[in-house]
Image (cartoon, coloured by chain):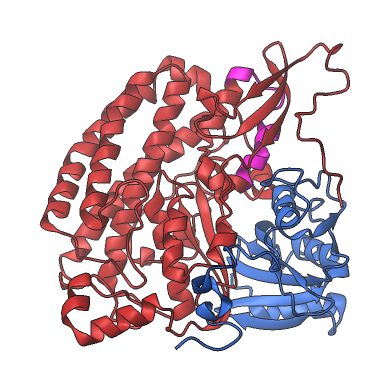
Chain colours: A blue, B red
Amino acid sequence: MALTHDDIKASLNTKFGEQLASYDESYGMLCATIPAAKNLEVIQFLYNDEKMKFRFLTDLTAIHYPDRTQEELCVVYHLHNLQDNTRLRIKAYVPVAQPDIQSLTPVFKGADWLEREAYDFFGVNFLGHPNLIRIMNVEEMDYFPLRKEYPMEDPSRRDKDDEMFGRGGSQFY
Amino acid sequence: MADTKSHHIALGEDSLTQDTTTINLGPTHPATHGVFQNIMEIDGERVMRTTPTVGYIHRAFEKIAERRPFYQITTLTDRLNYCSSPINNIGWQLAVEKLLGIKTPKRVDYLRVIIMELARITDHLICNSVIGVDTGAFTGFLYVMQFREKVYEIYEEICGSRLTTNIGRFGGFERNFTETAWRKLDEFLKEWPKALDEFDRLMTRNRIFMDRCIGAGPLTAEQALNYSVAGPNLRAAGVDYDVRVASPYSSYEDFKFEIPVGTTGDVYDRYLVRMEEMRQSESLIRQSLEKLKDLDPSIYHADVPEYYLPEKKDVYTKMEALIYHFKIVMGEINIPEGEVYSCVEGANGELGFYIVSDGGRSPYRCHFRRPCFIYYQAYPEIVKGGLFSDAIITLSSMNLIAGELDA
């Protein structure tokens, strides 16, 4: 029992070196930000290692941060060690101009549709995915709708401006 | 990037000369019980290959959620698994409460347990009776359906709506449970176990039902874990993972209940697991009622005026309530920055909410981990090589809800 956050950090540091990941903790969950080029290697290690045993892929999704140059797209993995009941979040940033990242399908079959979903909405290109096509949207679609450059609302509606949602420009009081 | 394919359904190269038959199961086939499609390659009665297509009722909830204040997203979650919307609602509220740091009183937790377990019962009873329908036993479905109606009446007493409930608020419920609600709940608890027993006698040891279900659509524990299957389908395969036990929320740690597990992960095991879960849910409701007796009956929400939308009558008569109402509706409440993953045991498994907040009034990004969407991927592997009729009951026993598939 009890795989602590320090254990996970120590284990990753011994295997991949100190400079691999930066860690932070948010609401009790450890988050490791790793270089996108190493995602498969790290997750494979976390899966195979007898102490880590992160063998359940809870969730896989992406986030678009248009302001982060060269790392606009963030791929977020949630892994779960069911035996010790420890969860781990892994993030890897890729540039929107060339959003390439290794697919997790060799480790988790369940990553298949989740990656297709992330591709469909964000355009993350999962290398080695067996069937990377759109899943929710029509195949003719030529853009990735969940990226931030596509506003959802009618642009003439003032009540849906960013400032109404506590972001950007002048605050609404 | 992958090539965008033509929107026509692509038949195989050899579709004219091949020995197998290609059939379309869905999108509006009576046996799919929802809008999704399977292109099946069958050889006589054997399923050689199946390609599921989803997305027919995709409503872009995650995009919409980026432009809705947190409290308005509750209504979007209704439409995920609409057979048990209160679990989605409360799951979302728990996720946001985690982000906001709201601690709910015990009474709220227990009331939520009652609602969530009622929802679990309605969801499972539909699933199990639909397995009956697909194996040719329509009667069971009609017997138990009236109890879903009774549960909906309880929801109606509590929140005013039936199917898409939008039940509760951040911090609790919008109003206390009425006398009528308690009476209806008592009636339900009196009548339901009898109906479940009757249903049990009708189905569980029925020779025809057993012959159809045992061995159909088996899923091993290894496969299930690798496909990230959760919920009753995972437990039927023999893995005792239940979020209510693994990471208790809403005071589930105060309750005594059992997690049924199966062995072979076939249709019959999935059916049995759901049957037992309905009994456990009923016991949870009874335990919850016991625990509520010692608690102040006037509490139905946490004391967090900055997040809890005040009662309408207070808004009209009290200054503070009016101010908070205005602040909440106009989005002047402080939402902390941060990232939260919170999950509940939905009727179909781990229902997760991943919220990325940048301090704005709506989430910067939110992602719903819909168990249905994830475990449906395993379907082609489960049915491959099996009988076509087994494929149909496998579909119903996995409890695929189109709303949850597509979000």
What residue appears at the point 24 percent right and 82 percent down from the top-left corner?
A: B321
In magenta stretch: residue B384 = yes
The image quarter containing residue A89 is bottom right
Is A52 above or below relative to B221?
Answer: below
In this rendered view, identify the residue nearer to me: A173 or A120.
A173
What's the magenta region?
B374-389
What residue appears at the point 65 percent right and 35 percent down from the top-left corner?
A: B379
In magenta stretch: residue B207 = no
Counting from the top left corner in percent of width and height, residue B158 is at 23, 56
Counting from the top left corner in percent of width and height, residue B218 is at 61, 32
Counting from the top left corner in percent of width and height, residue A71 is at 81, 75
Is B283 above or below relative to B273?
Answer: below
What residue appears at the point 25 percent right and 32 percent down from the top-left corner?
A: B195
The image quarter containing residue B146 is top left
The secondary structure that dominates the magenta segment is helix
Tell me if B293 is positioned left or right of B95 in this view: left
